[in-house]
Amino acid sequence: MEGQPRLAGVGSRAAAVLVDGALVFVGLGLVVGSISGQTYSGGGSHGFRLHGGASVAWLLLAYLYWIVLEAVWGTTVGKRLLNLRVVDEAGGAISWGQSAGRNLLRLVDGFPYVLPYLVGGVLAVGDDRKRRLGDRAAHTLVVYRD
Protein backbone atom coordinates (compact mmCIF):
# COMPACT_ATOMS: atom_id res chain seq x y z
CA MET A 1 0.00 0.00 0.00
CA GLU A 2 1.28 3.40 -0.93
CA GLY A 3 1.62 5.87 1.91
CA GLN A 4 1.80 3.17 4.57
CA PRO A 5 5.07 2.92 6.51
CA ARG A 6 7.09 -0.23 5.97
CA LEU A 7 7.07 -2.53 8.98
CA ALA A 8 10.45 -3.14 10.60
CA GLY A 9 11.77 -6.66 10.42
CA VAL A 10 12.44 -8.75 13.51
CA GLY A 11 16.18 -8.76 12.77
CA SER A 12 16.38 -4.96 12.65
CA ARG A 13 14.38 -4.71 15.85
CA ALA A 14 16.67 -7.24 17.55
CA ALA A 15 19.76 -5.29 16.50
CA ALA A 16 18.23 -2.09 17.90
CA VAL A 17 17.52 -3.86 21.21
CA LEU A 18 21.16 -4.97 21.39
CA VAL A 19 22.38 -1.38 20.93
CA ASP A 20 19.88 0.01 23.43
CA GLY A 21 20.61 -2.82 25.87
CA ALA A 22 24.33 -2.06 25.79
CA LEU A 23 23.66 1.64 26.38
CA VAL A 24 21.15 1.07 29.17
CA PHE A 25 22.55 -1.90 30.99
CA VAL A 26 26.26 -1.27 30.63
CA GLY A 27 26.57 2.49 30.03
CA LEU A 28 23.85 3.58 32.43
CA GLY A 29 24.92 0.92 34.93
CA LEU A 30 28.44 2.32 34.96
CA VAL A 31 27.13 5.84 35.47
CA VAL A 32 24.88 4.81 38.37
CA GLY A 33 27.67 2.63 39.78
CA SER A 34 30.14 5.51 39.63
CA ILE A 35 27.74 7.97 41.27
CA SER A 36 26.84 5.48 44.02
CA GLY A 37 30.41 4.26 44.57
CA GLN A 38 29.53 0.71 43.48
CA THR A 39 32.16 0.15 40.83
CA TYR A 40 35.19 -2.09 41.13
CA SER A 41 38.52 -2.47 39.46
CA GLY A 42 41.10 -5.14 40.01
CA GLY A 43 42.78 -8.13 38.48
CA GLY A 44 42.40 -6.66 35.02
CA SER A 45 38.63 -6.30 35.22
CA HIS A 46 36.40 -3.32 35.77
CA GLY A 47 32.68 -3.21 36.40
CA PHE A 48 29.89 -2.46 38.80
CA ARG A 49 27.75 -4.35 41.29
CA LEU A 50 24.62 -2.41 42.08
CA HIS A 51 22.56 -3.06 45.17
CA GLY A 52 20.01 -1.23 47.26
CA GLY A 53 18.85 2.17 46.09
CA ALA A 54 21.37 2.26 43.26
CA SER A 55 19.87 -0.84 41.67
CA VAL A 56 16.37 0.61 41.96
CA ALA A 57 17.56 3.90 40.44
CA TRP A 58 19.24 2.02 37.59
CA LEU A 59 16.09 0.02 36.79
CA LEU A 60 13.92 3.14 36.90
CA LEU A 61 16.31 5.09 34.67
CA ALA A 62 16.51 2.13 32.25
CA TYR A 63 12.70 2.06 31.97
CA LEU A 64 12.59 5.84 31.52
CA TYR A 65 15.18 5.64 28.73
CA TRP A 66 12.73 3.80 26.46
CA ILE A 67 9.62 5.66 27.60
CA VAL A 68 10.98 9.18 27.21
CA LEU A 69 12.85 8.68 23.95
CA GLU A 70 9.95 6.89 22.25
CA ALA A 71 7.30 9.30 23.56
CA VAL A 72 9.28 12.42 22.65
CA TRP A 73 11.07 11.38 19.43
CA GLY A 74 9.45 8.06 18.48
CA THR A 75 12.83 6.36 18.53
CA THR A 76 15.67 5.26 20.79
CA VAL A 77 19.37 5.44 19.99
CA GLY A 78 19.34 1.84 18.75
CA LYS A 79 16.23 2.33 16.65
CA ARG A 80 17.62 5.55 15.21
CA LEU A 81 20.87 3.84 14.18
CA LEU A 82 18.80 1.20 12.39
CA ASN A 83 16.43 3.77 10.86
CA LEU A 84 13.41 2.64 12.90
CA ARG A 85 10.68 4.45 14.78
CA VAL A 86 7.62 3.58 16.86
CA VAL A 87 4.21 4.78 15.64
CA ASP A 88 0.60 4.23 16.62
CA GLU A 89 -1.52 1.98 14.41
CA ALA A 90 -2.57 4.99 12.30
CA GLY A 91 1.09 5.90 11.65
CA GLY A 92 1.22 8.88 14.01
CA ALA A 93 3.25 9.68 17.09
CA ILE A 94 2.67 7.50 20.14
CA SER A 95 1.41 8.88 23.45
CA TRP A 96 3.21 8.78 26.78
CA GLY A 97 0.76 6.09 27.92
CA GLN A 98 1.44 3.96 24.86
CA SER A 99 5.17 4.32 25.41
CA ALA A 100 4.89 3.41 29.10
CA GLY A 101 2.67 0.42 28.36
CA ARG A 102 4.70 -1.06 25.51
CA ASN A 103 7.90 -0.69 27.50
CA LEU A 104 6.51 -2.10 30.74
CA LEU A 105 5.70 -5.27 28.81
CA ARG A 106 9.40 -5.65 27.91
CA LEU A 107 9.50 -7.62 31.16
CA VAL A 108 7.29 -10.27 29.54
CA ASP A 109 8.64 -9.92 25.98
CA GLY A 110 12.18 -10.30 27.31
CA PHE A 111 11.48 -13.68 28.93
CA PRO A 112 13.25 -16.08 29.40
CA TYR A 113 16.11 -13.87 30.42
CA VAL A 114 18.74 -16.53 29.69
CA LEU A 115 17.59 -16.31 26.06
CA PRO A 116 16.45 -12.67 25.91
CA TYR A 117 13.35 -11.68 23.99
CA LEU A 118 12.34 -15.21 23.09
CA VAL A 119 8.69 -14.48 23.92
CA GLY A 120 8.72 -11.14 22.08
CA GLY A 121 10.56 -12.60 19.11
CA VAL A 122 8.20 -15.55 18.73
CA LEU A 123 5.19 -13.25 19.00
CA ALA A 124 6.64 -10.81 16.43
CA VAL A 125 7.56 -13.54 13.94
CA GLY A 126 4.06 -15.01 14.23
CA ASP A 127 2.27 -11.68 13.77
CA ASP A 128 1.43 -10.19 10.37
CA ARG A 129 2.41 -6.75 11.68
CA LYS A 130 5.55 -8.01 13.49
CA ARG A 131 4.30 -6.89 16.91
CA ARG A 132 5.63 -8.15 20.22
CA LEU A 133 3.27 -8.28 23.20
CA GLY A 134 4.06 -4.67 24.19
CA ASP A 135 3.14 -3.43 20.72
CA ARG A 136 -0.10 -5.39 20.70
CA ALA A 137 -1.18 -4.05 24.10
CA ALA A 138 -0.21 -0.44 23.29
CA HIS A 139 -1.50 -0.54 19.68
CA THR A 140 1.90 0.46 18.30
CA LEU A 141 4.07 -0.59 15.37
CA VAL A 142 7.79 -0.36 14.70
CA VAL A 143 8.44 0.89 11.17
CA TYR A 144 11.30 2.08 9.01
CA ARG A 145 11.79 5.87 9.05
CA ASP A 146 11.43 7.49 5.66
Image (cartoon, rainbow, N blue to C red):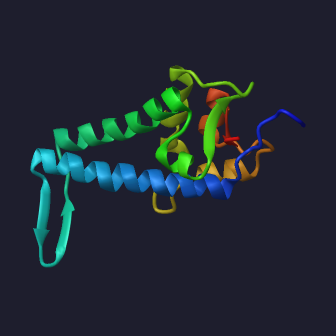
Q: Is residue 106 left or right of residue 138?
A: left
Q: Position of residue 65 (x, y in %)?
A: 40, 38
Of the 4 image quadrants, the one containing the C terminus is top right
Q: Nearer the viewer, residue 62 or 50?
A: 62
- Residue 13 versus residue 94 in the image, above or below: below
Q: Is residue 12 left or right of residue 125?
A: left
Which residue lies at the image location 47% right of the left edge and 55% below the top edge?
Answer: 19
Of the 4 image quadrants, the one containing the N terminus is top right
Return the residue found at the far front. 146
Q: Is residue 14 left or right of residue 18?
A: right
Q: Is residue 72 left or right of residue 53?
A: right
Is any atom of residue 112 visible in this view?
no
- Residue 27 versus residue 85 in the image, above or below: below
Q: Position of residue 110 (x, y in %)?
A: 51, 50
Q: Residue 49's quadrant in the figure? A: bottom left
Q: Residue 88's quadrant in the figure? A: top right
Which residue lies at the image location 12% right of the left edge and 45% below the top edge?
Answer: 36
Return the residue found at the far right. 1
Is any atom of residue 94 visible in this view?
yes
- Residue 112 versus residue 137 in the image, above or below: below
Q: Position of residue 9 (x, y in %)?
A: 71, 52
Q: Residue 56's quadrant in the figure? A: top left
Which residue lies at the image location 48% right of the left edge and 42% below the top edge?
Answer: 107
